Amino acid sequence: MNTNEFLSMAWRFNSLLLVLAGLACGGYFIAFGGRGRPGYFVAAGIIFVLALASPLGALADGYLFSAHMIQHILFLLIVPALLLLSLPRSFQLPAWLHVVTYPVLAWVAGVGAMWLWHAPILCNAASVSSRVFALQTTSLILMGSLFWWQIIAPRESDRLSPAAGIAYLFTACVACSVLGMILTFAPVSLCPAYQHPADQLGLLGTIRGQWGLTSERDQQIGGLLMWVPMCLIYATAILAQFARFHADAPQMEKHHA
Amino acid sequence: MNGTTTVTMFRDAVLDPAKRAHYRLAWLSTVDHKRIAVLYLMTALVFFVIGGMEAFFIRLQLAVPNNHLLHPDTFNQLFTMHGTTMLFLVAMPALFGLVNYVLPLQIGARDMAFPRLNAFGFWCVPLGGILLHFSVLAGGAPAVGWFAYTPLSLTPYSSLLGVDYWAISLFVLGTGSISFAVNVVATVVSLRGPGMTMRRLPLFTWINFVNAFIILMALPILNAALAMLLVDRQLSGHFFLPLGGGSPILWQHIFWAFGHPEVYILALPAFGIISELIPVFSRKPIFGYEFVAGSSVAIAVLSMGVWAHHMFTVGMGRTMDLFFVIASMLISIPTGVKVLNWTATMIGGRIQFRVPMLYAIAFLLQFLCAGLTGISHASAALDWQTKNSYFLVAHFHFVAVGAIVFAILGGIQYWFPKMSGRMLSESLGKWTFWLMTIGFNLTFIIQHFLGLLGMPRRVYTYPDLPHWGWMNMLSTSGVFFMSAASLILVWNILTSFFRGKIAGDNPWNAWTLEWATTSPPPHENFLALPPIHSRRPLWDLANPDRPDPVVGDDQVVLPNHNKVGILSFIFSEAGFFGVLILAYLYFYVHPQPGPTAKELEVGRTLVFTVCLFASSFTFWRAETALHLKRHVLMLGWLGLTIILGAVFLVGQVTEYWKLFQSGVEVGTNVFATAFFTLTGFHGLHVFIGLIALLIFLWLGWMRDLVAGKGSGFAFQAVGYYWHFVDVVWVFVLFTVYILPLIK
């Protein structure tokens, strides 16, 4: 299969996925109606479906570690952030769920998700078994939501202060950089399933030959994706915290007046 | 709100003048931030002369082709010493000096948070400088470049002691810089005057506050690298020597992980100076305060992630190059934002072309050039062609001299009246400025073209190729202008100090707090502070009918400075151990013949690990007992903490002994090198913690330890350190002992 064939044929909209997405949209409109910000929700849904059903999903499914890393970044950082942004301003968690909003716990969840799922055993299992993969995807979105709650919870009072937010994001950035460095410089495959893909689409020749992606280079790209662009997402959030730091007081003044 | 009411400062703790009269003679023992600042600046000036002489001889040697004025090895020594001196002994002390003088004044503080630590930080500079230059007597200065690439800097290729002195000297200087940064963070967070909220900080203070974090992140990385280099050189380690499985490239990664942020450590304070000068001499508030402040944060964050662009020519592979090209290009956004803000501040302003402003304008133009050539180096393809040529030499001198030195000179001209009470001569200042500008541009503009013609850098001489001769001669001619400028500057400082025009409190009609006190300020800095509601309190004071808009509310939150200080220190220590752990991991995944982690005895380690963790618990109990004023109980728990810590150390010594018995030493293979370095440095930290705890045991015994007082806060701070050392052990334990068990 050459590149063009692959790009046109590797779309795998399975019905379960579409039904799930449809149900989620329906649920969102029933729960929040016009109060939320549906644009964000739809964006989250589209990114989620595309990450799984587009050629990216096909590549991540046993071919390329780097494609799997892009999926991870989308599931852990992008989709949960959009989901939280789609909630109405007044949204708050039910009381019994407050236990999950401790900053340390949330940080460990958000950063730990990355470290945990890149332990060779788990990484392998997720790329071999579709059940483990489903578990992985769900857990990434949940842990990502937990992580972002501290930064972009709908109500200002649920968020960390800007200074604490900067420390929270900076340490997360360092932790993911370190893992990225380890992946980049590791001489051995940390996710062996990607070293010898079960070539179901007959694409391996194109990947290794035409695209020039050996399994070593593939893992290096994966590591670098986590090291550099993923950290830049945190860095962007840090700047947003800084903007908040300089913006919140005038609002408070307006409030007092 | 903006009337003339003043806030009286606490004066109870200030010594009365008669009692501190002897300080006038005792500059050596001073802990006053203003005097320490002057000492910093004087030291920088001395080394500026030395580093300048080195540059002078380098340029003389290169003035004509096939020159044999200097021996090749002497030339290598000169450019190594020139680079090291100018960065670590001139630029950093000069900037730290200005910060030390101005920052506490700008926030209405009486001194830095830790005056003795401040003095320690300063005295590291002369000590480091002496160590570095002592190498000349000990067999020859280092001749390996300021970056000391391995394996050239290892014993087989540099067998004399020069590199060892270089490494120890930088270690001392790095330690001094870290203590300075700890002090800056604690001062800004904990010692701000009434109304000086974080959102109202003058930009010089804000930028240096951010810069302190870069220092805390970057210098420990250098210290770790130097420790590893010294282990290799002195204990026959294998970190960087390919023969024993070490990796020379690893040195470059670690060095540039420090080296790139180092550029910003020098550039950000310069940005801070410029951000003060341009508004004052344009008679306008800064355009886009938040963007200048925020772009500094962006630079700080990005600075840590782009070091690999120094290594495009190493051969890291296209993949890695690509990512770092993109990341490096991003840096141009926040720096561009700054240039835009400075320029926009000048637009529509009533610009006064006084000497500091001339430096600021020259800075803007030269920094723009430096930035443009910088972007060209961010592109790996172009970088391959120009990296090892004079084009790069020209680029980084445009940063280091054209931007940083010009900002320092502008800052000195601007703040000298505050320090001395007298103005520097404006006409001599203009002579210095123009000679410096002409000389600098003569020397370095042409080097861009020399580089593009193919002249490599780091060569002691060159053949007589077309154009190379006259271009180099032109470049050398600029040096004479710069030397003349420097001489006039020194003359200006000397004469103005004794006979300059009396400055008065606020000679420039500036708006920040340092101009609200006398010149020079009294020992305690302020008798009273003006009310602070905006970013320009002195403008508000002078123009009560049209004050600046109020920024935020007046509420100032000041955490305890001991806590802030120790947390900043721990932050830096985390970086140090982070590097050692990553280096260990790097060699763990590249195993070599010989002993491996599998030979370590995990059982015994777990036993003494339990002791270490238990000591954190007992320390916590001691703290609780202190708060409950249960004195004997407190001593008991503290004593138990010390015993548990000591047991841990005994366990570690036993482990080392057993390993030595079985023939495993630092030099055995790269695993042993990494293992002993990592656990050894952790053990050293436990040992230092034990000494601190013993001091507190003694204080407690003497009944000098009281909760809620100074000693109580210090006790809490030592507790943070002790817990941190335990947390580090969690990571060491996992990496070294547990990881090999998982498979």
Image (cartoon, rainbow, N blue to C red):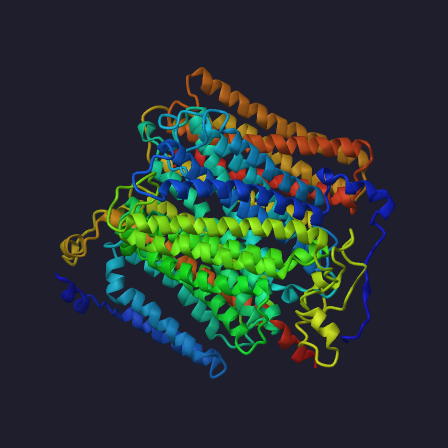
Q: Residue B290 versus residue A58: which sits nearer the camera? A: B290
Residue lying at 81% horizontally and 59% vertically, measured from the top left: B527
Q: Is residue A216 left or right of residue B712?
A: left
Location of the C terminus of chain B (image quadrant)? top left
Q: Residue furthest left?
A: A1
Vertical order, B309 against A14 (above or below): above
| Image coords of residue B23 (percent x, y) | 78, 42
User: Residue B378 location, x and y as percent?
Assistant: 35, 57
Outermost residue toward the bottom?
A34
Work out whether B380 lies above or below A80.
above
Viewer-nearest residue: A80 or B534: B534
A10 left or right, relative to A188: left
Residue B428 vs residue A101, the one in the foreground: B428
Please state the horizontal and vertical placement of residue B493, each as a whole percent of the image: 64, 51
Whether residue A48 is visible, yes or no, is yes
Q: How many marks?
A: 0
Front residue of B9/B671: it is: B9
In this picture, residue B498 sits left or right of residue B237? right
Left or right: B62 with respect to B557?
A: left
In this rendering, the answer to whether B695 lies above or below A29 is above
Where residue B275 sits: x, y (%)?
Answer: 57, 64
Name, please, the residue furthest toward the top.
Answer: B661
Q: Is residue B187 shown to the viewer in this render?
A: no
Q: Is the N terminus of chain B in the top left, top right, bottom left or bottom right quadrant? A: bottom right
